[in-house]
Amino acid sequence: MVSANSELTYDSKIEGDVIVTRADAVINWIRSNSMWPMPMGLACCAIELMAVAASRFDIARFGAEVMRFSPKQSDCMIVSGTVTYKMSAAVRRIYDQMAEPKWVIAMGACASTGGMYRSYAVLQGVDRILPVDVYVSGCPPRPEALLDALIKLQDKVKRERSFSKLNTA
């Protein structure tokens, strides 16, 4: 009997020179280990986002070192900082230009809840305009917290279904 957990991970059976596994497992393994972030550095959290790419924290260990500033080439948007209403339309437009599948990390208190800004100009959480997959707390959060969020997002991607079931009705 196959357990539910073995279906979600890259579980292979080696027969000679042939590896047998599920297509979902391989595709999700590839997606989770080669995330290309779209950095949306809007405020001070962007400095911590930049620190993650430096040698001390090295986001490359997790397959996310290819920061793409083109939405068509990225699959994970990292919203770091205060999102104003004036900027929210641009953030949404960039998200809409990203190819499927795509994920969002809200980095910091301002991106998650509006932070200390309770004003008419600040969006009270980026989740009002985008579907957020992982929230990172802190003001600003440490680079280790962003790496932890990336690991949690990779775990989520590994559990997703790659193919939708076809309607055979």
Image (tube, rainbow, N blue to C red):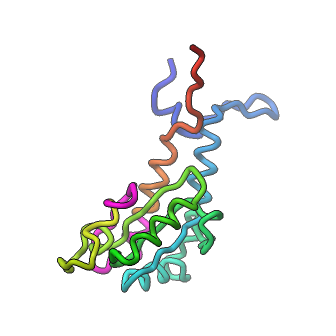
Compared to residue 31, the image places residue 12 above or below, namely: above
User: Seen from this angle, which residue lies furthest right?
Assistant: 17
Report which quarter residue 123 is drawn in: bottom left
The x and y percentages for residue 128 are 31, 60
* 126 and 46: which is toward the camera: 126
The x and y percentages for residue 52 are 48, 77
Q: Which residues are magenta?
A: 128-148
- How many badges with numbers are in the image? 0
The x and y percentages for residue 72 are 64, 63
* 11 and 137: which is toward the camera: 137
Question: Is residue 142 visible in this depiction of the protein?
Answer: no
Residue 18 shown left or right of residue 45 in the figure: right
Question: Is residue 13 visible in this depiction of the protein?
Answer: yes
Report which quarter residue 9 is drawn in: top right
Residue lying at 48% horizontally and 56% vertically, measured from the top left: 103
Residue lying at 51% horizontally and 74% vertically, measured from the top left: 39
Task: Examine the structure image and report whether residue 163 is included in the region drawn in magenta.
Answer: no
Quadrant of the rendering where the C terminus is positioned: top right
Residue lying at 64% horizontally and 41% vertically, measured from the top left: 26
Task: Examine the structure image and report whether residue 135 is included in the region drawn in magenta.
Answer: yes
The x and y percentages for residue 107 are 37, 70
Residue lying at 29% horizontally and 66% vertically, measured from the top left: 125
Residue 114 shown left or right of residue 9 in the figure: left
